[in-house]
Image (spheres, rainbow, N blue to C red):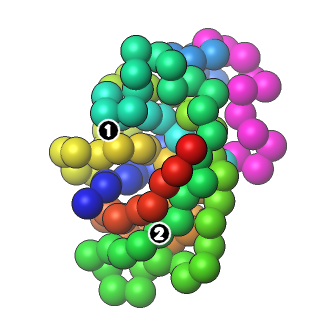
Amino acid sequence: MIYLSSFVVLNAASACFGSDSTQFPSINFFAAASEGIWDDGAACGRQYLISCISSVLPKACKPGETIQIKIVDRAQNLTSTPTRQGTTMVLSTAALAAIADSNAPSLNIDFRQ
């Protein structure tokens, strides 16, 4: 299972692109990478298609929704820590809301570069 939680960047520098505000996609679909996909910073700027497969919260996934996110930070550097050990990505609040009920404590997702 792949776990997620959400975060919002509030005038903070990211591990990927510092304080450059152009790093964030205009629709705010971005994420922080866990150590499993961080790849010594090579994950910065990578884009993934993600969709929700399942959750412990019944009916949390939005069926048929697939979005594209951009990696802009390292999950280890976030002040809002992931909800579970083993987290692969920490999604922005907008990205999480686009694929699932944002009250879900964790999600199993499909992601591909």
- Mark 1 neighbour class, 10 Å CA radius: few under 14, some 14 to 19, many 20 or more: some
Q: Which residues are magenta?
A: 18-28
Q: Position of residue 32 (x, y in %)?
A: 47, 35
Residue at left 76%, top 50%? 27
Residue at left 60%, top 32%? 46
Q: Position of residue 73 (x, y in %)?
A: 51, 27
- Residue closest to the eye, 105 or 46: 46
CA gap between label 2 and label 1 equals 20 Å
- Looking at the image, the residue that sits furthest to the left is 85
Q: Position of residue 21 (x, y in %)?
A: 75, 24
Tell me if residue 14 comes above or below residue 86 in the rendering: above
Q: Residue 13 falls in which quadrant of the image?
A: top right
- Residue closest to the eye, 84 or 88: 88
Q: Position of residue 47 (x, y in %)?
A: 62, 40
Residue at left 40%, top 22%? 39
Q: Amino acid at mark 1?
A: Thr
Secondary element type, mark 2: strand
Tell me if residue 16 comes above or below residue 32 in the rendering: above
Magenta span contains residue 101: no
Residue for badge 2: 52
Judge from the rendering whether residue 5 lies leftward or rightward of residue 63; answer left or right: left
Residue at left 47%, top 17%? 41
